[in-house]
Image: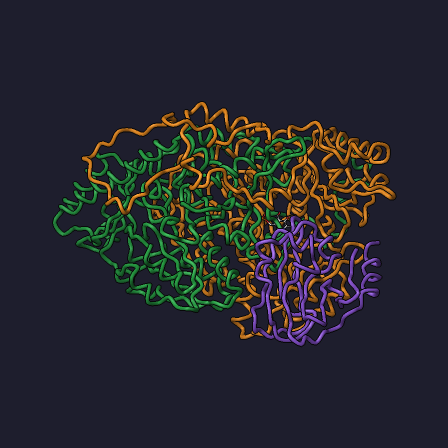
Amino acid sequence: MNAPSNLKYTKSDEWFDPASGAAGITDYAQSQLSDIVFVEILVDEGEEVTVGKAIASVESVKASAEIYAPAAGKVSAVNKGLSEKPETLNSDPYGEGWMIKIENGAAGEVMDSAAYEKYCEGRTH
Amino acid sequence: MTYIPISPQERDAMLKTVGVKTLDDLFEAIPAKRRFPKLDLPPALTEMEAAAHLADMASSNENVRQDLISFLGAGAYNHYVPSVVDHMLRRGEFYTAYTPYQPEISQGTLQAIFEYQSLMTNLTGMEVSNASHYDGATATAEAVNLAYAQYRGKRKKIVMSPSVNPQYRAVIRTYSQGMGLTEVGDEAGNHEDGPEVLMSLIDEATMLVVVQYPDFFGRIYDYKKLIDTAHEKGALVCVVANPTALILLKTPGEMGADIVVGEAQPFGIPLWYGGPYLGFFTTKKSYVHKMAGRLVGETVDVRGNRSYVLTLTAREQHIKRERATSNICTNQGLLALGCSVYMSVLGRQGLQEVANLCYQKAHYAAAELSKIDGFGLCHPEPFFHEFVLCTPKPAGEVNQYLLDHGVLGGYDLSTDYPDMQNHLLVAVTEMNSRDEIDTLVALLKEM
Amino acid sequence: MATIIEPTIFELSSPGRRGVTMPASDVPTVDLPAKDFLRSELPLPELAEVDVVRHYMKLSSFNYSVDGGFYPLGSCTMKYNPKINEDTCRLPGFLFTHPLQPIETVQGNLALMYEMQDWLKEISGFAGVTLQPAAGAHGEFTGVLMMAAYHKSRGDTKRTRMLIPDAAHGTNPASVGMLGMSVVTIPSDSRGNVDLKALEAACDDTVVGMMLTNPNTLGMFDENIEKVIKLVQGCGGLMYGDGANLNALLGIVRPGDLGFDVMHFNLHKTFSVPHGGGGPGSGPVGVSQRLADFLPSPLVGIIEEGDDETAPLYGFVNPKNSIGRMKAFHGHFGGGLVRSYTYILMHGPDGLKDIAQYAVLNANYLQARLRGTYRIPYDRICMHEFVMEGHFEGSDVRALDISKRLMDYDFHPPTNYFPLIVPEALMIEPTETENKDTLDRFADALIKIAEEAKSQPDLLHNAPSTTQFGRMDEVKAARELVLCCWLPENYEA
Ligand SMILES: Cc1ncc(COP(=O)(O)O)c(C=O)c1O
C-alpha cells in the first residue's frame, strides 16, 4: 500500500493535497474496491463543498462507494476525463486519478501518511 | 396433496439428528400464544379436483378466442403466439431456474437474455437494453428514475404528453411521490393536440419529455423535432413504443430518443387478464450506468469459451442499496425469453407479415366503419393498428350494445378523458378476420 | 478468439430462411404510411422453426434448475413447482381474457382474485391485501409508499427515517431510497435478533417505521419480536415485514397477529410461482386496518352481494386514500395468481402448515449435519434457512470457492456473501420439497469439500471443473461492455 507523505488522509479513505487542493481516493480504497468501472463526479466547478459532502460515486465490478469531500471550500476544478477512464483510479489514484480541486480547502479531520498507513493495517485483520 | 418427499420414518430420524422430539418443538422462538393459528381456508383438494375446479373458474369467463370477437387494445393486444414459444417456456431448465447468479451453470438464461437485449436494441434502434421491467408502465416510471438520477435531482420537471397511456401516467405519479417533481403537458383537454404543443413547455429545468409511439389514440408522429428541441434544452426524451408498430415504423432511435420503453406483451405473451407482461427498456450507452435492472454482458470463461455474465451489478440494489436508482430485483425473465423465441421463430419476415396484417386490417376496419352514418375517424393522422372512432352515441352505450352481440367493441376513452364521451379506441390485429370486421360494421350499421 | 459453444440467434440467421408464416391478408390492400414514417431496415434474425428449437434446447441444457437438481439458494425458496400449476395457468379462460374486458365477462378471474385476497389475509392475519405488485421489491415500494401516506394523512411530516437491520436484503434500503427517505441501520445482537438497545436509541418521532425480515436473513426468528414491534410502534412508527421468508411461517404464526402493519408476500417463493430464470414473480401486500385505506387501486371487491341462487358480482373498488396505481392492469394474474391459487387450494390449512414444518426440519437437519465442519455464527434452532461461514482457519479458500466446487458435485450453490454481516456467508435454504437422501448427499459433499480445502485447495480455487463452463472474466465484461451482439452500425458489415 502506498500513501505519499505530502498528502493528508481521511478515515473514509480520501486523500487531500493541501498544496494543490486536489482530492481523490487512496491506494488502499482502490485496492479494496478492485476493478473500478464507473466514476461520476457529483459536484460542479464553482460549487462550495463542506467536509463530508459526497463529491463522487464509484462503482467497481463488485462494490460501490461514495467519496466525500476531505476539505471545505470552493471546487476550482473537476477531473472531467476521469469518467471516460475510470480504471485510472486503480492505476494512478494519486496522480491522474485526482477527482476535484478545492480552492484554499480547509481540511476536516485528517491524518498524515504514517497514521493513515497504520489505520489501514489495522483494518486488514 | 403434498409435495413433501419425506416419510414418517425419515422424519423421525431427522428430528433425532436435530435433537428435538416433534416438529412442533422447532418453533419455540415463536410467541406461544400466537403459535399454530387455525387457518380458515378451504380443505385441500387433490390434483384431479383442483384441475376441475380451476377449469370451471376459467370457463366462467368469456374469452376473446372462443366466446367474444375483440377489438380491445389500449395497452394489451390479442396476437397469435406460435406454438414453439410455449414449448420452450415449458422447459423446466428455463422456468425452474433462478436469476443467473452463478454463470457457470446458468449460461442458458444468460445467453438468452443477451440475445433478448440484442433483439430489443435492434428493434428500437437503441444501443443498450436491460433484462426487463415488470411491465410497460413501470418501465416508463423507471425512465423517470433514470432522468432524475442523470440530473442528480437538479432538474425536476417532466413534460408529459397527455396521449401517453393513462395507466402509465398514473404509475409515474405513484412512483415519483418522493421526488418533488412537477409535471406539465398532461392537463385535461390537451389530448387533441400533437407534439408541437409540448415543445414550448420544455425548458432548462426539464429533465424528461415522455411521449408515446404510436400514441394512446393510435396516432403516428415523427418526434424528431420535439426530440431536437428537448436536446437543445438539455432534457432527455423517453418514447413509449409499441413493439409491433416498430416492425414497420421508423425507430425512435433514428429520431434521436434517449430512452425507448414499452410493453412487449404483443410479442408472444398471452393476454392473461393483464399480466405478467414484459416491460422493455432500451437506452443509449452513455446512460447505462444510470439504467436500472439487470444487464448481461459478453465475456470469456477460464477455458476460453465465449460466455455471458450479469455485469455492472454495482448499480443495483444488492450492492448500492439506498443509493441505487431502483429497487428492482426479480424481473420478467421468462417472458423476455418468450419474447425472444417469438421474434426468432417469426423472424424478420414473419414479423413483417404480422405488422402488415395489423396495418391492413386496421385500415380496412377504419375505412368501413367511417362509411357508416354518424361514425367517423376522430383524427386525421396516420395510424398503425389502433384508431379512435367517433360514435354517434356515448362509447359506453355502443360497447354495451356490441357486447350483447358478442363483440368487445373497443376501449371507451371517456374512462380516462371525460370530454371524450363519444370516442371509441378500436384495435385490430392479425387475429381479426375480415368476417369479424364485417360483423362489427354490420352491427354498428344496425344500431 | 473465444471458442463459441452455441452461436447467438443472430449468428444462426441466414437470409431468406423462414420460420412461422402468417396467413395472407383477407382485406383489400392499402398503402403503407409515407416512407418518412417507415424504418429503412429491420435487423432481426431469419431462421427455420427447427433452428429455433435446437438453439433454445441447447441453451436450456446449459442451465441448472430445480427440475434438474437441488437448489438450496438461501432467501430464494427454490422449492419444487408442481406441474399442475403450469396447466391451470394456461386454461384458455385465463390465457385469453383481456384486462379491460367488462367485469361481467370475467367473473371467473375476479372471483379467483377476490378469494386470493381473502386467503392471503387469512394466512397472514392482515385486514387488507393488494394483488397488484409484480414482485417482492415492488411490494416493498408499495408498502413504503403506504407508510409515508399514512403519516402524511395525519399531518405527521417529520418522519423521514426508516430503520433497517444490518442483515436486510438490498431491496429494503433501495425501496426507501426511491422515496428519498434516509436509512438508519440497526445492528443485530449475538443471537441474531434485532439489537434492542440500538433500536431503542434510534426510535423517535422522526421514524417512519422499521422494515424487518422475520425470520431474518440469518434464518432466525426474532426472539423479541413483540418487543421490537412495540418499540417501533411506541414511537409512532409502522412495522413493515419483508415476507420473503414466509415459507417458514405458514400455519405457524401470522405476522398480522404479531402486530406487523404491512408485509409483502413473494408468491414466487412461498406459493410456488416458478422463478423463471429471474422472473416474473408476484408480490401482493397485506396491511393492517389502519393502512387499508391507502392500498393501491383498484382492489377486487363485491359490487352486488349474491345469495343462495346467484353468485355475487365481483368488480373493482378504489380504497379511499389510495396511493394510486403501482402498475398497469391488475397484477400478475395468469402466471402469478393462478399458479398460487392452485397451490393453496391443493394444500389447505394443514398442508400449508406441513410446508413450513418440513422446510424448517430440512434446514435444521442440514445445520445439524454441518455443524462442526463449518462455523455457524448464530447457532440455534433456525427456521427455513441458516447461514454458515465458508472459510477455514489458515486457509485462503473462500465461500465462493466452496460454492463453485459444489457445482462439481452437481449441486447448485447456496447464496454467497449475503447477509453482509456474516463473513464469507453461505446461506442455505433447502425447502420442504427435498428428501433426506438429497440432504445427506449435499451434506456429505460439503464435508468432503471442507477436507479438500485443506488437502487440495486448488481443487476449490479452480472449480468448477466438470461443468460445461468455467469461471467467467467479470472484469472483461464490465470493462468492454459488449451488451448486444448486433449493433445497428455493424449490421451492414
Ligand atoms: C429477503 C428478501 N427481500 C426481498 C427480496 C426481493 O424480492 P423480489 O426479487 O421478488 O423483488 C428478496 C429476493 O430475493 C429477498 O430474499
Residue drawn at 32 percent across, 67 percent down: B200
Figure coloring: by chain
The answer to which image quadrant residue A108 occupies is bottom right
Image quarter in which the C terminus of chain C is found: top left
Chain that is orange in the image = C
In the displayed structure image, the side of residue C13 where residue B16 appears, left or right = right
> Image quarter for residue B360?
top left
Residue C52, horizontal then vertical, whole percent: 46, 27
Q: Residue C155 at x, y = what percent?
A: 54, 75
Which chain gets the green colouring?
Answer: B
Towards the viewer: B10 or B271: B271
Query: Can residue B319 be seen here?
Result: yes
Q: Is residue B366 left or right of residue C128?
A: left
The x, y position of residue C182, in whole percent, is: 62, 66
Task: Point out the residue furthest to the top here.
Answer: C50
Chain with purple colouring:
A
Task: Using the image as rendered, state which of residue B303 and residue C404 is in the foreground.
Answer: B303
Q: Percent x, y for residue B282?
A: 46, 48
Residue B347, compared with residue A32, is above or below; it is above
Report the quarter where the N terminus of chain C lies: top right
Q: Is residue B413 above or below residue C492?
A: below
In this rendering, does residue C274 appear at all?
no
User: Horizontal placement of C125 versus B169: left or right?
Assistant: right
Q: Nearer the viewer, residue C42 or B400?
A: C42
